[in-house]
């Protein structure tokens, strides 16, 4: 029978078989009513009965979702069974009241064995048998609560929260009955909540929420899931009752007689269940935020098989050691996430009027209660996004609505200015107007929805008629920030969540990658030959994305007590790449003063992070007595195998539109950092050299990291050393030397250290000789390079110590003579430069 009910529920969700309700109702009454629990326990069939009852109420919940809006004009003209505009059957309101009456009887905890026994009992004395039977009943209560919520949502839809001035003309009598059942049966603890202290109303043994939070810790996943589902239903139904009564305030008050003195339960119902239970619910929120923090590590190895992985039902999950998106681990985390989102919606973020600069060593001391709660909620909502799976589109939309609301953005702006002050970054004009926050909210919300929730479309492609191969067009040369391996046909179009038989899991971008929030920064879709954004909206999205990124970085940097930040979990490679792509389409983002300051601050901040990572790598290598390898910025590995193409196009844009802009040049110079993988460094250097742009790079003092990050360890890659030498000998570094560019320092340092410090046992003498001879020939042919060659000879020789200077110069000349391999012309040049060096 359970399977039959499940089949019927699926049919109802697609708009079929709703007319069968009248035929099935008499048979369903047996399962919908409270049973004689003693007989069920005596015959050991409580589990079976609860399973059928649970599915029966889930069927009613599915039917309730087809109800027309109670107060819509069309409802008054409809009689009996009706059809929606899509020719889908809908349920009739005349069937609802009997169903609600049966459902409310399940909210009387005193009538439910095992459940009422758990309230007030020492959890250590609770047996596993009691918990097992209680879990069966909790599943029934959960389905009852969700069914009632579906009914109430058709009276006052959740969207009405944004329509404060939309009253309801009348209210069904069962609405306050449901609310009183929640209050009188101790489903929540109202002790000490709200500003009302006329009476005390709470259960002596605790509330249902206390029991459910305790059972959430249980090792059995079925018990944990039933407790979470029950809590979620309780929160939703409480919010819906409050919404219905508040919207129908006049109608509700008129039903009460004049001179009526409300009891505590009525007072709670009139002023709001959520208001009176806010302390209890805040405790639940803190408990579940802690749960979610411990669950996020499960998702880290999900993408072993790529974004898609095996189809549902094939094996256990998507390649994750924890089971993947189809495992009990992730299902529990996703249910926790949905509960957290409904709880954070209940407690609006309040911005403190007098915000105090936070002491990074003791952040918790300077934080107010509002700020602490806001920080915890921001962190938890980001974690929610990390556990979303296919089908969680509505959950992600809720998360975005919270994360991008104006009070949160104002907190982020405060933390940005706080960050600049704490770490000594100069910034100005980082104060935004109200309309700018609203604009960020709108454009970012729109971008993230279209990027991650819209159905994927097929990219433009070309057909090779000779071999019928399809090649993706990359005319603009830009790489997607987030790679999507599979795309759909353009004919697939959009489809609604409930009215289509299309496969739900295809053509969508969930689960989200960890760096999903970076997608707003490189949102520019421009042609290669264009230097401007396609529209003002694209530019606004990029500005908003930069603001959001720096705000999140500042938030978690200033509050290190917020462990395992979802932002810090994102690789530095992706963040730096996002900054580069923001400049690919033009410099508009740098022409705006505020966004330029934001961009520059991000560069400074990531430069400090880069230096810290480099120092840790050196320390780790030293501890293990290993050769130091610092190439942890592996753009080609993490972002795209054709990353060198992107670098070449970025540098082409740099030469075409930047005019040597310092911020743009610093971003380009990043790719010459010693921590960047060799293939990317080589591509960047060659592109700069071929375009004669080496002199446009800033000096080392203006770059991302300290100069040491670009210079150490000494370069040993043959191709890169040859590229340095080629640029030197071709004259590409002449202006760079005059301007003090980082490019000349790089070539000078690495060539000097390699040529003069290569030992005979290293096996690289032939390369050393080749490079030295090339430099000598260039010196012989270009007399204006004499100053450069003298700098090469005297690099890092202490001028004040004459004896040491002469000894070291003598050694270097001997190295050059040895490299000449008895070539008389080159030896003559060595003697010539030696005379000049000793004189100077």
Image: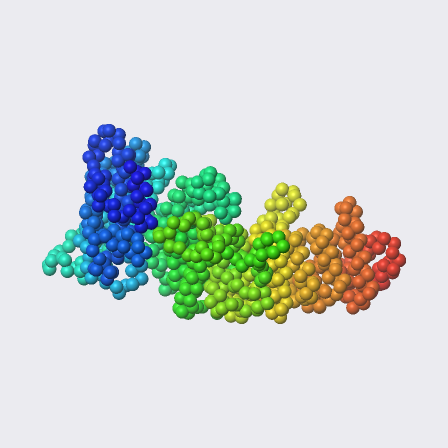
In the rendered image, residue 573, in percent from the top left (x then y), is placed at 56, 54
Residue 801 occupies quadrant: bottom right
Q: Residue at x 87, y 60 (%)?
A: 825
Residue 371 appears in the rendering: no
Q: Residue furthest right?
A: 824
Quadrant of the rendered structure where residue 577 is? bottom right
Q: Nearer the viewer, residue 26 or 226?
A: 26
Looking at the picture, how far across and down is residue 409, in whole percent?
42, 62
- Compare residues 826 and 707 and report the one nearer the observer: 826
Identify the image quadrant of the C terminus. bottom right
Q: Does 117 sit above or below residue 497?
A: above
Q: Residue 215 placed where, x, y %?
A: 33, 40
Towards the viewer: 828 or 371: 828
Q: How is the image coloured?
A: rainbow
**Closer to the camera in the image, 317 or 776:** 317
Q: Residue 784, percent across and down?
A: 78, 68
- The residue lying at 51 percent from left, 51 percent from top is 486
């Amino acid at each position: 029978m359970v399977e039959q009910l499940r089949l019927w529920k699926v049919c109802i969700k697609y708009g079929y078989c709703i007319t069968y309700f009248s035929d099935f109702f008499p048979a369903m009454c047996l399962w919908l009513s409270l049973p004689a629990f003693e007989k069920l326990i005596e015959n050991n069939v409580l589990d079976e009965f609860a399973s059928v009852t649970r599915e029966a109420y889930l069927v009613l919940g599915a039917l309730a979702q087809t109800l027309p809006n109670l107060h819509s004009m069309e409802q008054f003209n409809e009689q009996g069974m009706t059809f929606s505009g899509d020719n889908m059957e809908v349920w009739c309101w005349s069937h609802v009241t009997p169903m609600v009456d049966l459902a409310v009887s399940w909210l009387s905890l005193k009538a439910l064995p095992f459940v009422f026994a758990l309230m007030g009992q020492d959890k250590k004395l609770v047996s596993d048998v009691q918990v097992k039977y209680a879990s069966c009943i909790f599943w029934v209560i959960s389905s009852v609560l969700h069914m009632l919520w579906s009914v109430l949502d058709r009276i006052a839809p959740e969207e009405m929260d944004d329509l404060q001035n939309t009253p309801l003309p009348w209210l069904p009598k069962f609405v306050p009955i449901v609310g009183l059942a929640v209050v009188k049966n101790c489903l929540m603890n109202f002790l000490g909540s709200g500003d009302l202290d006329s009476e005390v109303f709470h259960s002596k043994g605790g509330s249902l929420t206390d029991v459910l939070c305790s059972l959430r810790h249980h090792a059995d996943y079925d018990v944990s899931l039933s407790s979470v589902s029950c809590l979620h239903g309780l929160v939703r139904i409480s919010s819906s009752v409050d919404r219905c009564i508040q919207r129908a305030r006049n109608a509700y008050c008129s039903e009460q007689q004049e001179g009526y003195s409300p009891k505590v339960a009525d007072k709670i119902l009139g002023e709001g269940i959520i208001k009176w239970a806010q302390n209890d619910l805040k405790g639940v929120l803190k408990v579940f935020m802690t749960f979610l923090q411990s669950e996020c590590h499960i998702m880290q190895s999900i993408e072993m098989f790529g974004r898609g992985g095996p189809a549902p039902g094939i094996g256990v999950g998507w390649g994750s050691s924890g089971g993947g998106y189809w495992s009990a681990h992730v299902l529990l985390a996703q249910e926790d996430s949905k509960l957290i989102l409904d709880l954070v919606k209940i407690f609006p973020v309040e911005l403190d009027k007098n915000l105090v600069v936070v002491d990074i060593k003791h952040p918790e001391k300077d934080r107010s209660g509002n700020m602490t709660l806001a920080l915890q909620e921001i962190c938890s909502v980001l974690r929610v996004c990390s556990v979303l799976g296919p089908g969680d589109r509505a959950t992600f939309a809720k998360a975005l609505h919270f994360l991008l609301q104006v009070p949160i953005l104002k907190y982020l702006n405060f933390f940005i200015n706080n960050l600049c002050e704490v770490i000594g970054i100069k910034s100005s004009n980082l104060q935004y107007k109200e309309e700018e926050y609203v604009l960020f909210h709108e454009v970012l919300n729109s971008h993230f929805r279209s990027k991650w929730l819209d159905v994927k479309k097929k990219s433009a492609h070309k057909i090779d008629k000779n071999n019928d191969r399809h090649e993706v067009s990359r005319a603009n040369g830009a790489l997607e920030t987030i790679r999507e391996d599979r795309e759909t046909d353009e004919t697939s179009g959009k489809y609604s969540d409930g009215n289509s038989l299309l496969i739900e899991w295809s053509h969508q971008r969930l689960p989200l990658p960890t760096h999903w929030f970076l997608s707003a920064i490189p949102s520019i879709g421009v042609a290669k030959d264009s230097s401007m954004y396609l529209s003002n909206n694209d530019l606004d999205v990029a500005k908003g994305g930069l603001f959001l990124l720096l705000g999140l970085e500042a938030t978690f940097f200033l509050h290190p007590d917020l462990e395992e930040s979802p932002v810090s979990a994102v690789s530095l490679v992706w963040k730096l790449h996002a900054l580069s792509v923001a400049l690919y389409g033009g410099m508009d983002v740098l022409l705006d003063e505020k966004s330029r300051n934001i961009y520059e601050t991000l560069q400074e901040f990531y430069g400090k992070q880069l230096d810290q990572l480099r120092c840790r790598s050196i320390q780790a290598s030293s501890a293990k007595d290993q050769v130091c390898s610092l190439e942890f910025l592996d753009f080609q590995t993490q972002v795209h195998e054709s990353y060198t193409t992107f670098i070449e196009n970025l540098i082409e844009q740099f030469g075409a539109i930047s005019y040597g802009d310092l911020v743009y040049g610093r971003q380009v110079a990043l790719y010459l950092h010693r921590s960047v993988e060799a293939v990317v460094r080589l591509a960047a250097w060659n592109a700069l050299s071929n375009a004669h742009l080496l002199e446009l790079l800033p000096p080392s003092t203006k770059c991302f990291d300290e100069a040491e990050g670009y210079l150490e360890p000494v370069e040993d890659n043959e191709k890169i050393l040859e590229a340095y030498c080629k640029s030197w000998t071709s004259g590409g570094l002449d202006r760079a030397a005059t301007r003090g560019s980082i490019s000349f320092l790089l070539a000078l340092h690495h060539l000097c250290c390699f040529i003069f410090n290569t030992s005979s046992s290293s096996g690289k003498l032939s390369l050393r000789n080749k490079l030295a001879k090339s430099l000598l020939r260039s010196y012989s042919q270009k007399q204006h390079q004499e100053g450069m060659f003298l700098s090469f000879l005297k690099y890092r020789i202490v001028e004040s110590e004459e004896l040491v200077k002469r000894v070291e110069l003598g050694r270097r000349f001997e190295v050059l003579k040895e490299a000449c391999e008895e070539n008389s012309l080159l030896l003559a040049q060595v003697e010539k430069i030696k005379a000049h060096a000793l004189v100077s």
